[in-house]
Image (spheres, rainbow, N blue to C red):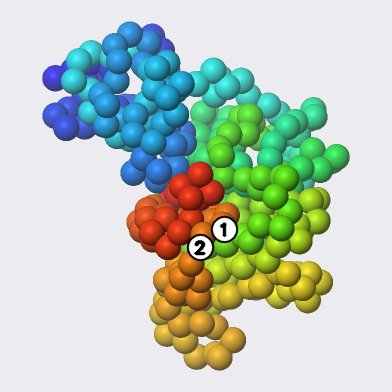
Amino acid sequence: MTRIKFGEQFFEAENNETVLNTLLRNNMQVPYGCKTGVCQCCLMRSLDNAPPEKSQVGLKDTQQKQNYFLACLCESEDDMTVALLNNETSWLDAEVIEKTDLSTNVILLKIKAKEPLAFIAGQFVNLRRNDGVIRSYSIANSPNSEHELAFHIRILPNGKFSRWVADELTIGMPLSFSHAQGDCHYVAGQNEQPLLLIGTGTGLAPLYGILLDALSTHNHQGEIHLFHGSRDASGLYLEEKLIALTQKYSNFHYTACLSGEVHDKKYTPGRANDIALQNFPNTTGWRVYLCGQPEMVLHSKRAAYLQGASLKEIYADAFLS
């Protein structure tokens, strides 16, 4: 067995156990999302040995050289001393200003930061309870002078954080959050480029922020196509607002997709990613955003690339919630 040093504590890793699972098994509060290496929420740094190569897949060269690694992919081969990123230890203070049901299992949570903050629509932050429980959530709004952040939180039956949001968190309560992270965001300067946005479940959250940023802030002129998928209609929780945006902006198009039974002609039957890429078999020159379940993101990233999209123009955010 190998030993993992985190802070001032040592933990023994079981055979074939990842660093992330070792820390979680020992009740260490570390951020994570998809657990498959796609979302990069669990990015950490090795302070002594170089981490296994497979734990650095998808990271930038500069990150690899600084011994950054994805804890969910890292099965330690030797004893390791690991740490969260520097900005993970710097927490900002906020207050809950809104909590609204978007559907039977999705809550809109809005917080207001105590001081000015910098973020780009589509990035994510880590939210932290007073007892140290941490979860990562994408930002569902664009930057604003009020220093507000919005999140779409799916309530999981046994979710330690999401159930607390649903049952105990109230307006006016304090909540800590990290600095914004992530590369899945609107890129200014290519105003005419067509955008393809594909999301499942609460993967809509970053896409909604990106959409508002593109249309309202940057006056994007290129065609924007959003495909949002769910098993049933209750998962299409922003349907009315998105339809209203199609009426306001002629270059924005919204397709609601259902992978389960379809009883209304306004919904397109099938998986959102399959429908989107069937509708646009040539993605050359497009900027593609993929947000939602890890399997969907990985499959769609490969498909969009094979259909012409440059890897540099494909932005992905995968997570379980």
Against 211, residue 68 (above or below) is: above
Q: Nearer the viewer, residue 202 or 225?
A: 225
Work out which residue is located at the far right of the displayed protein and give it. Answer: 145
Q: Which residue is mark 1?
A: 286
Checking the image for residue 283, the label placed there is 2
Q: Nearer the viewer, residue 93 or 125?
A: 125
Residue 291 appearing in the image: no
Against 113, residue 221 (above or below) is: below
Residue that appears at 68% across and 66% down: 223
Residue that appears at 41% across and 31% down: 59
Could you classify mark 1 by the number of other residues whose Cα lies within 10 Å: few (under 14), some (14-19), or many (20 or more)? many
Checking the image for residue 145, the label placed there is none
Against 269, residue 30 (above or below) is: above
Q: Position of residue 84 (x, y in %)?
A: 46, 21
Q: Nearer the viewer, residue 155 or 264?
A: 264
Please give left or right for residue 143 compared with residue 195 in the image: right
Question: Type of residue at label 2?
Answer: Thr
Residue that appears at 42% across and 78% down: 270
Q: Secondary structure at mark 1?
A: loop
Image quadrant where one finds the N terminus:
top left
- Are the two marked residues, 2 and 1, in contact with CB atoms closer than 8 angstroms? yes
Question: Type of residue at label 1?
Answer: Trp
Could you classify mark 2 by the number of other residues whose Cα lies within 10 Å: few (under 14), some (14-19), or many (20 or more)? many
Q: Secondary structure at mark 2?
A: loop
